[in-house]
Image (cartoon, rainbow, N blue to C red):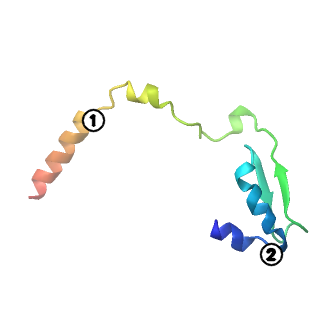
Amino acid sequence: QAFVKAAMPEGARGFLDSIPALRNRECIICGEGVAIPIRVTFDNLEEHKRPASEDPSFVDLWSKDGGEEELVERVVMRWRSQG
C-alpha cells in the first residue's frame, strides 16, 4: 500500500480508498501518461490469448496421489549421502 500511495499524486489519494472495490479487469491509471488518475476497465481477452492463471481445483489435486513417497525417498537419499 505504501508503494501505491507514493506513486499517486497528493490530490488523487482518494483513489486509494477505491482500490479494494476494483472488479476484475479494472485498474487505476496514474502517472505521466494521463492528466489525472482514472479508473479503467480492460476488454475481455479471447480465451486462447489469456495466460494460464486460473486457480487450481484443490479438491481435485488433493484427491489424487501426488507421488510424495518418491519425493520423500529422494530427499532421504540426499540427506544420507551428505552425512
Say the numbered circle drawn on residue 10: 2
Q: Is residue 65 left or right of residue 45?
A: left
For the N terminus, the quadrant is bottom right
- Residue 16 on image: x %, y %: 74, 62
Q: Nearer the viewer, residue 75 or 5?
A: 5
Q: Closer to us: mark 2 or mark 1?
A: 2
Report helix, strand or loop for mark 1: helix
Q: Residues within 10 Å of mark 2 (few under 14, many from 20)?
A: few
Question: In this rendering, would 83 be left or right of 72?
Answer: left
The residue sitting at 65% across, 70% down in the picture is 3
Q: Secondary structure at mark 2?
A: helix
The x, y position of residue 50, in whole percent, is: 68, 39
Where is the C terminus found, in terms of image quarters? bottom left
Residue 47, compared with residue 22, is above or below; it is: above
Amino acid identity at mark 1: Glu
- First in sequence: mark 2 vs mark 1: 2
Circle 2: residue type: Glu
Q: Position of residue 62 (x, y in %)?
A: 39, 29
Q: Using the rendered view, name the quadrant where residue 23 is placed.
A: top right
Residue for point 80% across, 61% down: 29
Q: Does 60 appear above or below 50?
A: above
* Image vertical order of residue 71 relative to residue 7, above or below: above
Q: How many marks?
A: 2
Query: Is 83 on the left-hand or right-hand side of 34?
Result: left
* Front residue (pair 61, 79): 61
Q: Residue at x 70, y 74 (%)?
A: 6
Q: Residue 26 — which label?
A: none
| Near-viewer residue (74 or 63) | 63
- Any mark on residue 68, and which? 1
How far is disc 2 from disc 1 in space, using C-alphas?
Answer: 52 Å
